[in-house]
Image (tube, rainbow, N blue to C red):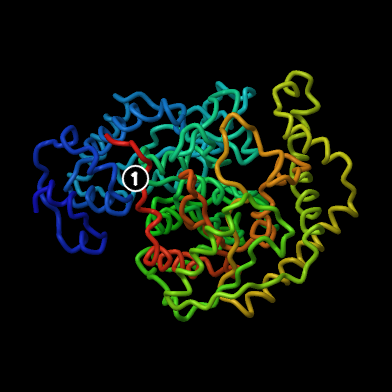
Amino acid sequence: MKRREFLSKGLTVSTAVALGSSSLSQSFAAELPADIINMSASKLSAAIRQRQVSCEEVMSAYLQRIHRYNPVYNAIVSLVEDDQLLAQAREADQALASDQYRGWMHGMPHAVKDLTAVAGLRYTSGSPMFADRIAQEDSAMVARMRRAGAIFIGKTNTPEFGVGSQSYNPVFGATGCAYNPELTSGGSSGGAASGLGTHMLPVADGSDMMGSLRNPGAFNNVIGFRPSTGLMGGGDPFSRSLSSSGPMGRNTEDAIRLLHTIAAEPASHQPQALKEQLPGADRYGPLNLADQKIGWLGNFDNYLTMEPGVIDLCESNLQTLSAAGATVESCTVQYDMAELWQCWLDLRNWSRTSMRGYYENSDTRPMIKPELAWEIEQSYSLTADAIYQANAARSRWYREMNRLFDQYDFLVLPTAQVFPYSKDLHWPTEIDGRQMDTYHRWMEVVIPASLAGIPVVNVPAGFDQQGRPMGMQIMGRFGEDKKVLEFALAYEGVTDHLSRRPAGMSV
């Protein structure tokens, strides 16, 4: 098979394994870079492994894309010099020629969220305090991707310390939505999602406390998956953290493959790691939608305010699922949602106690963004009883979610309460006439999954009349990560939202 024909037809990983290696022919990256950057990460991986395309050609194509579009979107920061990256790509080609295949990310360019350490790269966390910091070693997650063969080309932009669902910071500025660079990409994994949506990255990692994988996924029309708490490891091994790392992809298959790479292995320092519950990455398939019962939570009986059009867009996709055979019903939680919000505030603010040193230091305090300073200030007033009550409320919420999962296979919510807004606006102060009393109240829709620690995936819901993307959260029972991702595969089969590309973008 000629390499031009290979790229035009595409190739699944399972088919590629059966083909065997073919010899490299002359370089064609300059002629057909669009074919390279438009391939899914899974198909690109197969192309590299079967030597249908060289790692150097892949790197050249992606660098060409980045140099053309990144000045507009500002998704990738701290980019490594071209000559260094091309040299690493050539070394990856030499390794492959010697039958030294490193894994499914062999020779693929990858940019890590700038809250994560990559040895030798800038590690700013979006803060002027660390504008010149260079990481001395890889984080555990990065080490896993490096072992799988990834070439780290730089970092993806994030808000300061990941605070806020709008990816701007005083070090690098703001990141634009893939479908309109004047609008926000969301956050805190905004650079990752924008890089995916603009095809400047084949796949991306992120992290999520308050929707930071899901909100950017919705705002950039890509997949963002927050796993069950514990699957990714990290943090306190004996508690259910509010935050989790996770994968993002242009499609669900790519997100699945990255999840299997970055999930933590069970070990003495990660006693609650859940990776052994995942099957092999090739053992996922679309669910039969006719067997699925979906509970639609909507806006929690008008508790949440939504920008006009959000609910309608989501419900149109629920009708599509219903037409495909799924049972879809509106459902109601038996819980005081105002109490859940207070639970969230107390636990989130309590998590900022580790940052009090920055606040109490007269040199660093002026560098802290106002929203983060406010959260740190709130942490000082929290009592032991308040934290006890918050954890008790969280436990009751978990039980309520399980009650609903006894009735439904999946629970569904909009991913955001607003469509992407101007990237010059730090956060929406009102929605449909209702004032937001905190900087993150406009993202309250994401806390149900975060507090429960359950698997949740953002799937695209389509676009409004202004061309702004939106998504839906698909939530499953704790530990049923595979089932949630298989639902997303089925959803892709009955919708075509992921095929819609940003207007006017070419190579």
In the image: residue 83, left or right of residue 94: right
At horizontal 36% and vertical 40% (from top left) the residue drawn is 503
Residue furthest to the top in view is 363
Answer above or below: position of 105 versus 79.
below
Choose between 141 and 216: the one closer to the eye.
216
Choose between 99 and 280: the one closer to the eye.
280
Q: Element under label 1?
A: loop
Q: Residue 54's spot in the image, x, y percent? A: 20, 41
At horizontal 55% and vertical 25% (from top left) the residue drawn is 173
The picture quadrant where one finds residue 153 is top left
Quadrant, the N terminus: bottom left
Answer above or below: position of 17 versus 35.
below
Q: Residue 495's spot in the image, x, y percent? A: 40, 62
At horizontal 35% and vertical 65% (from top left) the residue drawn is 282
Q: Residue 166's spot in the image, x, y percent? A: 59, 37
Q: Residue 293's spot in the image, x, y percent? A: 54, 77
Q: Amino acid at mark 1?
A: Gly
Question: Looking at the image, how many numbered discs can be counted on the residues?
Answer: 1
Quadrant, the C terminus: top left
In the image: residue 248, left or right of residue 46: right
Choose between 80 and 498: the one closer to the eye.
498
Q: Which residue is mark 1?
A: 149
Q: Residues within 10 Å of mark 1 (few under 14, many from 20)?
A: many
